[in-house]
Image: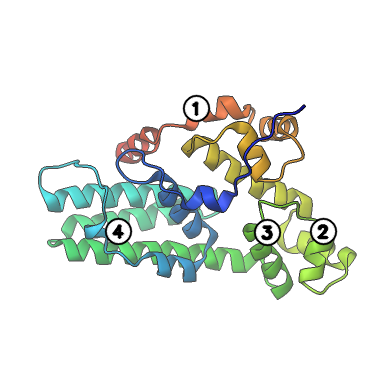
Amino acid sequence: MPVQHKKISYQEFLHREYEFFRAPLAPEMDFYETIRSGNLRKVRSLLNEPFHMKKGLGVLSDDPLQNLKYHLTITTALIARFCISGGLSQAEAYSLSDYYIRLADEASTPEEISEIHNEMCLHYTKQMQNLQRSTVTSKAVSTAINYIYEHLHTRITLETLASVTNLSAPYFSRLFKQETGNSVSGYILAKKLETAKSMLASSSYSIAEISASLAFPSQSYFTNVLKKDCGLTPKEYRVQNRNINFYLQRALKN
């Protein structure tokens, strides 16, 4: 008989308390993904704790203010890279990064650092929101995209999306392709793969559990589509991307 794997949801993955490098990693990655998605309302709700009072920040300097500046620099660099991967131009992303890092360097109190952090997060989110709005204009496609993000743990069909947008399947399919540049099935697969990569890199869930949680038809199918996407099997991707030190070192070097 086939082995039965525990069913998990990707929402559970995103919000679990996963301790790594002092601070919970998954919520941090979820926060960056939220900024990249341009979800301004959710980002505002997540900025409920002042940055200078955030728990779990590592000690990068014995001076408390300098320590906060280092962490804000790392956060800004990571957000810039997430937004670049979401379509923001490198020139704009790095320009914003330089601007906020310079502001932080001139700050004289922890409260100023927190204000700069919130302003920076909201600024990037607004840019990503504007970027999305420039390519997606109809309410129907926006509704469908929101549905996709909220139901990645299920099998999403063209018929389902057409139903939630009150359009015929053929018309919705054409509209979606026109506004996103991708087919419905291609877009859904891309978002499932993005989430799968995040789960591989920052959780201990097995490859089979991740495959099941994102409703891939089978683990072998998941392996094949991931390898086609990035040239790596799930195991190889996990090995290459597991350690958060990669991101931190990259941020500090730049």
Residue 157, image x and y in percent?
80, 56
Bin the neighbour count of mark 2 within 10 Å (Cα to Cα): few under 14, some 14-19, many 20 and up: some
Tag 1 near tag 2, CB within 8 Å:
no
What is the crowding at mark 4: few (fewer than 14 residues within 10 Å), some, or many (at least 20)?
many
Examine the rendered structure and indicate whether residue 229 appears above or below residue 160: above
| Residue at mark 3 to residue at mark 2: CA–CA distance | 11 Å
Residue type at mark 4: give it.
Answer: Tyr
Q: Are marks 2 and 4 in contact (CB under 8 Å)?
A: no
Q: Secondary structure at mark 1?
A: helix
Q: Earlier in the sequence, mark 1 or mark 2?
A: 2
| Quarter in which the C terminus is drawn | top left
**Left or right, residue 33 beside residue 243:** right
Q: Residue at x 76, y 55 (%)?
A: 156
Q: Earlier in the sequence, mark 3 or mark 4?
A: 4
Label 2 belongs to which residue? 158
In the displayed structure image, the side of residue 30 where residue 158 appears, left or right:
right
Q: Which residue is mark 4?
A: 100
Q: Look at 29% across and 41% down and name the residue there.
A: 22
Amino acid bearing label 3? Ile
Observer-nearest of 253 and 227 = 227
Q: Which mark is residue 99?
A: none
* Dot 1 crowding, Cα within 10 Å, few <14, some 14–19, many 20+: few
